[in-house]
Amino acid sequence: MSEQRQDAKQSNRIDITLERYHGRDYAISNPTWDVEDSPWKVDQVLRMMRGHTLVPASIAEIGCGAGAILAGMRGAFPAAKLYGFDIAPEAAQLWKEYAGAGIEFALGDFFEQSDRRYDLLLLLDVIEHLSNPFDFLYRLRGHGTHFIFHIPLDLSAVSVLREQPLLHVRQKVGHLHYFSKGLALALLEECGYHVMDWFYTGAAFSAPQRSWKGRLFSLPRRVLYALIRDVGVRLLGGDTMIVLAEPRSVPQR
C-alpha cells in the first residue's frame, strides 16, 4: 500500500472515532458533559498542585468540555491565564456560561489552534478517547512545562471477566483504550514523559456520579483497598488516578 493510501486510511479512521464529538451523539448520551463531576476533579488537580507547589501563570485544558473545570480553577489562580480547547461544537455552546471567568476558549484541534507553550496542561479523561494516544502525547510534549492527567482505570480482573463494564464506557462515553495503573504510567513514559508523581483518587468512594453497582461494591473495595491498594484496584477496579508529569525532552517546533 502506498504512503498516500496509508495516510488516507489513517485519516478516515481518526474521523470515524471523533465523529461522536463533532456531531450530537456524545451530547445526547451525556447531556451535562459531566459538569457535576467538575468540582471533584478540580479538588484532585489542586491536591496534586499543592503537593508540588505549582503556581502556573498559564493553564490550558485540552478536552475542556463545558469549561466548568477551568472555571473552578479560576478561584485558586485568579491571576493565571486560562485556556480551554475542545473539538465538540455542542460543548462550545456551554462556554458562554463562563464568559465572566476570563477563560479563552477555542473550538477545534489543539495542534491547529495553538502553537504556544503553557506552564500547565490539563488532560482530564482525554487519552482513553484518542484513536492514537501515542502520537498525540508525543507531539504534545513541547506545549507544556508540566502536565496533569486524570485517567480512569477501567481495566481490572472483574471488568475483563464481566466485559460489560468495558463495553458500557466504550458506548456511552467513547473510551477506546482501557488502562490499569501500570499501563497508564508506561504509556506516558514511552511517549517521552517523566512521571513526577501520581495518586489514586478514591473515585470508587468519592466521585459524585457513582452507580448503584459502584456503591454496592464499596464495602469489599474498602476492605481490599485497605489491605493492598494496588491489588484491590487491579482486581475490582472502580478507581482513577491523577498523574503529574514533565517532558523528558522538548522537541523543536
Image (cartoon, rainbow, N blue to C red):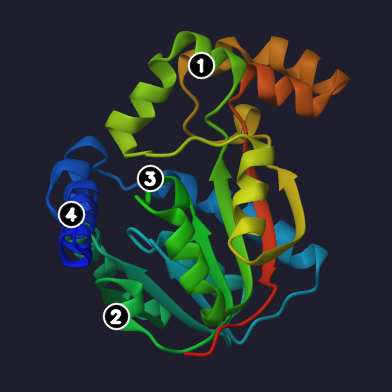
- Residue 236, quarter of picture: top right
Q: CB under 8 Å between callouts 1 and 2? A: no
- Per the image, label 2 sits on a secondary structure element best described as helix
Query: For the residues carrying marks 2 and 3, which lies nearer the camera in this image?
Result: 2
Please name the residue shown 32% across and 39% down the image: 174
Estimate how packed mark 3 is, as few (under 14), some (14 to 19) or many (20 or more) residues with alpha carbons within 10 Å. Answer: few
State the residue in front, 176 or 125. Answer: 176
Give the residue at mark 4: 9
State how far apart marks 1 and 2 are (Cα).
37 Å
Q: Does 199 appear above or below 119?
A: above
What's the residue type where badge 1 is placed? Val
Please name the residue shown 84% across and 22% down the image: 226
State how far apart marks 2 and 3 are (Cα).
26 Å
Residue 231: horizontal and vertical position, in percent?
A: 77, 22
Considering only order in the chain, which callout, 1 or 3, is on the residue closer to the N terminus? 3
Give the residue at mark 3: 34
Considering only order in the chain, which callout, 2 or 1, is on the residue closer to the N terminus? 2
Give the residue at mark 1: 160
Please name the residue shown 67% across and 55% down the image: 243
Q: Does 134 appear above or below 138?
A: above
Residue 10: horizontal and vertical position, in percent?
A: 23, 56
Give the residue at mark 2: 112
What's the residue type where badge 3 is placed? Asp
Please name the residue shown 22% across and 63% down the image: 7
Considering only order in the chain, which callout, 3 or 2, is on the residue closer to the N terminus? 3
State how far apart marks 3 and 1 are (Cα).
25 Å
In the picture, measured across the screen, residue 165 lies left or right of residue 56, that is: left
